[in-house]
Image: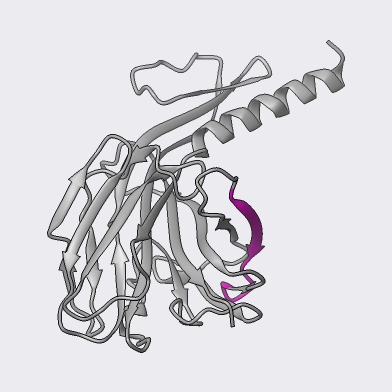
């Protein structure tokens, strides 16, 4: 095989491995972005390759709601299906913005190595890596998905950063996004801004057939990202970031996945 062909084969193998490891993206989708005090809110959550059609259930995590007054309450009614997770909860008698969260979900452990010019991967912890292979990556996925809904006028208390893990800290209120304006936010990890961090933005056609459009933006030197809002629709922002896992974890690193679902309206 010629050197150029060998290089092409290696790059193709690497792209296939990376695609397989990251093909499914977590999400949380509320049944309504406009809610009523004392009303009920429902969410679908899962992993998908096409938004928002779930292929894999999100699983058993501490689904929660931060109220407009800043109190965190749990979803009381959660149902696990094979392809999606559904959660419902009656809201308190409070006007303002609510933060909906899946809570953290630990997923599969991935290992990727290079051997004889080929890239291989494994999710089975019992599979032994060949002695002559070079380890490229070893991490466990950790996913959190969130969304904001509002009763009456948007308030900001529920937007306060958690300060732990990966998150989007909104500058522009996520319940106040309109075409021809901009969505500005900061990407943080453990309370610190991430510089030059890629953010993938998906716009869903919501017709259950078409592919979701995607664009990529990056944070600046202060961790700030700016998304011009050209079209109305339901969007999802995806951030992936790897960092050392705590002692006793199933892998030396966590592959953090954070997604935020938001709606953009016409003027």
Q: Which residue is drawn at 42% across and 38% down?
A: 139
Residue 70 picture quarter: bottom left
Q: Quadrant of the C terminus?
A: bottom right
Give the residue drawn at x 61%, y 28%: 16
Q: In this view, does 174 lie above or below 251?
A: below
Which image quarter: residue 28?
Answer: bottom left
Q: Is residue 59 above or below residue 15?
A: below
Q: Position of residue 79 (x, y in %)?
A: 19, 46
Q: Which of 139 and 21 is in front in this view?
A: 21
Spot occupied by residue 162 in the image (x, y as percentages of width and height): 32, 71
Q: Residue 108 location in percent, x, y?
A: 36, 34
Q: Quick check: can you spot residue 187?
A: no
- Magenta highlight on residue 46: no
Residue 177 in percent (x, y) is at 52, 79
Q: Can residue 133 be seen in this view?
A: yes
What residue is at 55 percent from the left and 25 percent from the top?
113
Figure disc tally: 0
Residues rendered magenta in the picture: 212-224
With respect to residue 226, does 84 lie above or below? above
Q: Is residue 222 magenta?
A: yes
Between 20 and 203, the residue placed more toward the observer is 203
Q: How is the image coloured?
A: one colour
């Amino acid at each position: 095989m010629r050197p150029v062909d060998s290089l092409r084969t290696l790059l193709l193998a690497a792209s296939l491995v990376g695609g397989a490891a990251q093909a499914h993206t977590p999400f949380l989708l509320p049944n309504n972005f406009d809610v009523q005090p004392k009303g009920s809110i429902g969410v679908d959550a899962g992993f998908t390759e096409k938004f928002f059609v779930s292929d894999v259930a999100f699983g058993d995590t501490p689904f929660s709601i931060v109220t407009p007054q800043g109190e965190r309450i749990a979803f009381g009614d959660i149902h696990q299906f094979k392809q999606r997770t559904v959660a419902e909860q009656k809201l308190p008698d409070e006007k303002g913005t609510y933060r909906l969260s899946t809570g953290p979900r630990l997923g599969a452990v991935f290992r990727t190595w290079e051997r004889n010019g080929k890239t291989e991967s494994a999710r089975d912890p019992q599979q032994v890596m060949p002695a002559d292979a070079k380890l490229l990556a070893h991490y466990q996925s950790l996913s959190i998905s969130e969304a904001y809904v509002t009763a009456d006028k948007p308030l900001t208390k529920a937007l306060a950063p958690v300060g732990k893990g990966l998150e989007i800290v909104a500058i522009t209120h996520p319940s106040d996004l309109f075409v021809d304006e901009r969505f500005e936010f900061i990407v943080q990890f453990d309370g610190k801004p991430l510089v030059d961090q890629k953010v993938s933005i998906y716009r869903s056609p919501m017709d259950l057939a078409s592919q979701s459009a995607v664009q990529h933006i990056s944070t600046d030197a202060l961790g700030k990202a700016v998304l011009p809002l050209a079209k109305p629709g339901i969007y999802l922002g995806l951030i992936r970031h790897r960092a050392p896992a705590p002692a006793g974890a199933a892998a030396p690193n966590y592959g953090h996945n954070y997604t935020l679902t938001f709606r953009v309206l016409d003027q």
